[in-house]
Amino acid sequence: MSAAPSTPAPGHEPDAVEAIVPLIPFVLPAVGGVLIFLLAFIAVVMA
């Protein structure tokens, strides 16, 4: 059996997931904050 190479090829293009993963700690709280604000705005408008 042959093992998968541990290092990517020199011409390796990063896929979309590899490009987004480092940004998750910044994007997730920002999206959560926007969602909370949106839900609060909807609750105030309906009240």
Image: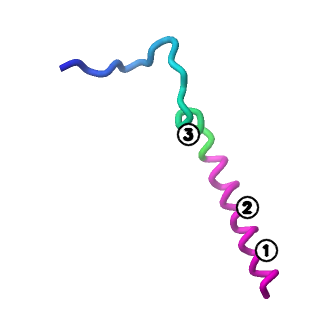
From the top left corner, tell me how far across and down residue 25 is, in percent.
Answer: 61, 47
Left or right, 25 with reference to 38: left
Rendering coords of residue 33 (x, y %): 71, 61
Question: Quadrant where the N terminus lies?
Answer: top left
For label 2, the residue is 34
Name the image quarter holding the C terminus: bottom right
Q: Which mark is residue 21?
A: 3
Residue 34: quarter of image: bottom right
Badge 1 amino acid = Phe
Q: Secondary structure at mark 2?
A: helix
Q: 10 Å neighbourhood of mark 1: few (<14), some, or many (≥20)? A: few
Identify the secondary structure beneath mark 1: helix
Q: Residues within 10 Å of mark 2 (few under 14, many from 20)?
A: few
In the displayed orientation, state which residue is furthest to the top: 10
What stretch of residues is rendered in magenta? Answer: 25-47
On residue 5, the disc is: none
Q: Residue placed at 66% from the left, 47% from the top?
A: 26
Label ID, residue 41: 1
Q: Residues within 10 Å of mark 3 (few under 14, many from 20)?
A: few
- Decide which of tag 3 and tag 2 comes sooner along the chain: 3
Give the structural element (helix, strand or loop) at label 3. Answer: helix
Residue at the spot x=31%, y=21% of the render?
4
- Distance of mark 3 from mark 2, alpha carbons? 20 Å
Kindly indicate the quadrant of the structure image that contains residue 30: bottom right
Q: Earlier in the sequence, mark 1 or mark 3?
A: 3
Inter-mark Cα distance, 1 to 3: 30 Å
